[in-house]
Image (tube, rainbow, N blue to C red):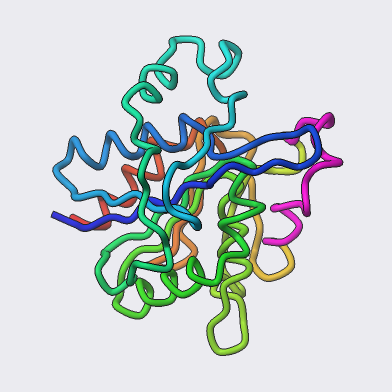
Amino acid sequence: MANILMVISNAVQVKDYQTGYWAEEFGVPLQLFEEAGHNVTIASPKGGDGKVDEASLMEQWDPDGESKAFQKLERYKDTKRLADLSGKSFDVVFFVGGHGPMFDVSYDPNAHRVINEVYDKGGIVAAECHAPSVLAFTYRDGKSIIDGLEVTSFPDAYEPKEILSFLPYSVEQELAKVGKYTSNLDVPEYAVWGNDQIITSRDPSSSALIAKEIMKKLS
C-alpha cells in the first residue's frame, strides 16, 4: 500500500473573511484512500490544527450532512508540520482544496520542497480546486513544475463575487500563465493528468474522481 501525504490549510483571516480547507475535498479523498488500505499522513504549513472553511459545512454545500459528520472525526487536529517532513517518505502528496491554500499552502517553501522531493522519486503530485496554485509557485530548473502541462482548478466563472476582494490572486489566471489551463465546464466532474506524475481537479464535485484516478495509477 502507498504512503500518502495530505496537506490542508491552517486558519486564514483576511479582514472579516475567514477561510481554510474545503471539508468535502478533505473528507472524500481521505476516506477513499483509507478504505483502500493506503497509509495517510495529514500535514499543514504550521502543523497543529487545520481549519475548515465553515461555508463548506452549510446545508447549501453539504445537503446530506456528510461533511459535518466527517468534521466530527477531527482528522484536522494535530497535523504534522510540513517543515518536519520529507517528500522522500511518500508515494503521493495531495493538496486539499478550499480558499485557504491560496494564502498559506501555496506560498509555503516546505510545500514546494516536498513537491519536488515526491516528484524526484517518481511519486504522484496532486492538487484539487484552489490548491493547484501551489504547483504554479513550485519551481524546477527555473520553471514552474507545471510549465506547459495541462492543468485545471476552480474556475473564475465559479468564484463567488462577494469574496473576490479578499483573494490574493485568481488561481485560474496563475495556472494559465505557466500551464495549459482547462476547466471543461460541460462535465459534472473533472480531473486531468498533466503528465504521468501530476494531476489536478476542478471543484468539490471532482473530489472522488481525483482520488480514484490516483489509486488507479498506484495500482
Please tell me which residue is depicted at 79% across the width and 32% down the height of the picture: 16
Q: If the image is split into quadrants, where does the N terminus sit?
A: bottom left
- 211 or 163, which is in the foreground? 163
Residue 153 at what x, y percent from top left? 61, 48
The residue at the point 60 percent across, 60 percent down is: 106
The residue segment tinted magenta is 159-175
6 horizontally vs 154: left or right: left
Total labels drawn: 0
- Residue 90 vs 48, above or below: the answer is below
49 on left or right of 92: right
Report x, y in % for residue 49. Answer: 44, 42
Q: Is 136 or 189 nearer to us in this picture?
A: 136
171 is within the stretch colored magenta: yes
Residue 166 seen from this side: yes
Comparing 94 with 17, the one in front is: 17
**Magenta segment: does it hold 108?**
no
User: Could you tell me which residue is drawn at 22 percent across and 58 percent down?
Assistant: 3
Q: Quadrant of the C terminus?
A: bottom left
Chief SS of the magenta region = helix
- Which x, y percent locates residue 75? 34, 35
Q: Where residue 184 sits: x, y (%)?
A: 62, 43
Q: Compared with residue 108, is residue 121 higher up or lower down, i.e. above or below?
A: below
User: Does any portion of residue 196 appear in the rendered image?
Assistant: no
**At 42% from the left edge and 47% from the top edge, which residue is drawn?**
48
* Residue at far right of view: 165
